[in-house]
Image (cartoon, rainbow, N blue to C red):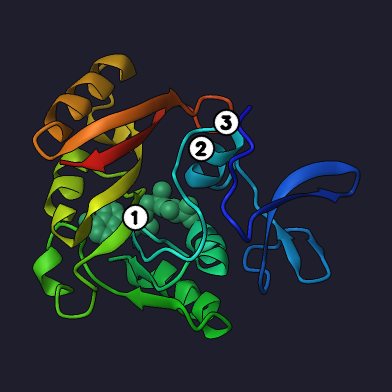
């Protein structure tokens, strides 16, 4: 397994088990050790991509656009080690918890917006973000990634978790993943893919580079 973790993410022991961890206020009842909080890969697609040693290219300190922030489980870890982190979520209920997670994180900017309408937050988000992290679990996941490519810097990366069942519950996940990758090719070069099965059923992790 690759040990290329971003600065600010460490492997540390919690109750005798080695886990990924970041430094920040706890958000979802995760175990803590001083300022460190365990990052649960079963609750986080990005956490599972790091656990599986995927080449995310994350170094720490980068500008991030996070699509599908929900109540802030994963994006709070991201904001612990990244630079400015714009967190888009369109459902009001989880967004309330997201706002709470942002209270102790001055680099985390929650946006109650629809990721299918990037023009609605284009006036807030910097136009050259280093990384888009996407976990929207909705139909049209490739389209959302393509429409948000406008924010990415020239050599920017997409870290995408695709949920097969959100596209079509009746199709084999492999077929859905193929179609998503084919559509993504309109704007991205795929660097790496890996099934997240060990942590998330019928999900594919994709690392891609903006074309
Ligand atoms: N990424 C979160 C985490 O790891 O903590 C979990 C995200 S959950 C699987 C998917 C989220 O995407 C939901 O909260 C849903 O409301 C949000 N979502 C789906 N479609 C969206 C859209 N078009 N714009 C913004 N958020 C969306």
User: Ligand 1 appears in which quadrant?
Assistant: bottom left
Give the image location of residue 170, x and y in percent. 25, 20
Determine contact: label 2, label 3, CB under 8 Å: yes
**Residue at 34% from the left image edge and 57% from the top image edge:** 68
Quadrant into which the N terminus falls = top right
Q: Is residue 40 left or right of residue 19?
A: left
Residue 202 seen in this snapshot: no
Residue 49 is marked as 2
Determine contact: label 3, label 1, CB under 8 Å: no
Q: Cα distance, mark 2 to mark 3?
A: 5 Å
Q: Quarter of the image holding residue 111? A: bottom left
Task: Classify 10 Å Cα crowding around label 2: few (below 14), some (14-19), many (20 and above).
Answer: many
Q: Is residue 183 left or right of residue 69?
A: left
Q: Cα distance, mark 3 to mark 1?
A: 19 Å
Quadrant into which the C terminus falls = top left
> Considering only vertical position in the picture, is 166 above or below 197?
below
Q: Cα distance, mark 2 to mark 1?
A: 15 Å
Task: Classify 10 Å Cα crowding around label 3: few (below 14), some (14-19), many (20 and above).
Answer: some
**Residue at 31% from the left image edge and 47% from the top image edge:** 157
Residue 41 seen in this snapshot: yes
> Considering only vertical position in the picture, is 74 above or below 189?
below
Q: Secondary structure at mark 3?
A: loop
Q: Is residue 144 left or right of residue 162?
A: left
Reading the chain from its start, which is encountered first: label 2 or label 1?
A: 2
Q: Which residue is label 3 attached to?
A: 52
Residue 131 is marked as 1
Q: Is residue 77 left or right of residue 99?
A: right
Reading the chain from its start, which is encountered first: label 3 or label 1?
A: 3
Q: Secondary structure at mark 1?
A: strand
């Amino acid at each position: 397994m690759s040990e290329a973790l971003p600065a600010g993410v460490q492997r540390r022991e919690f109750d005798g088990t080695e886990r990924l961890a970041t430094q920040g206020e706890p958000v979802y009842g995760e175990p803590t050790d001083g300022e460190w909080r365990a990052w649960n890969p079963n609750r986080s697609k990005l956490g599972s991509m790091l656990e599986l040693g995927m080449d995310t290219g994350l170094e720490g300190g980068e500008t991030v656009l996070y699509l599908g922030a929900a109540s802030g489980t994963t994006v709070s870890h991201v904001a612990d080690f990244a630079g400015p982190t714009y967190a888009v979520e369109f459902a009001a209920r989880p967004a309330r918890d997201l706002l709470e997670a942002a209270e102790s994180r001055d680099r985390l900017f929650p946006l109650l917006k629809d990721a299918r309408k990037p023009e609605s937050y284009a006036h807030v988000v910097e136009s050259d973000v280093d990384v888009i992290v996407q976990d929207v679990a909705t139909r049209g996941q490739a389209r959302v990634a393509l429409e948000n490519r406008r924010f990415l810097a020239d050599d920017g990366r997409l870290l995408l978790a695709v949920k097969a069942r959100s596209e079509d519950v009746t199709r084999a996940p492999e077929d859905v993943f193929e179609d998503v990758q084919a559509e993504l090719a309109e704007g991205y070069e795929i660097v790496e893919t890996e099934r997240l099965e060990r942590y998330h059923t019928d999900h594919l992790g994709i690392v891609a580079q903006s074309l």
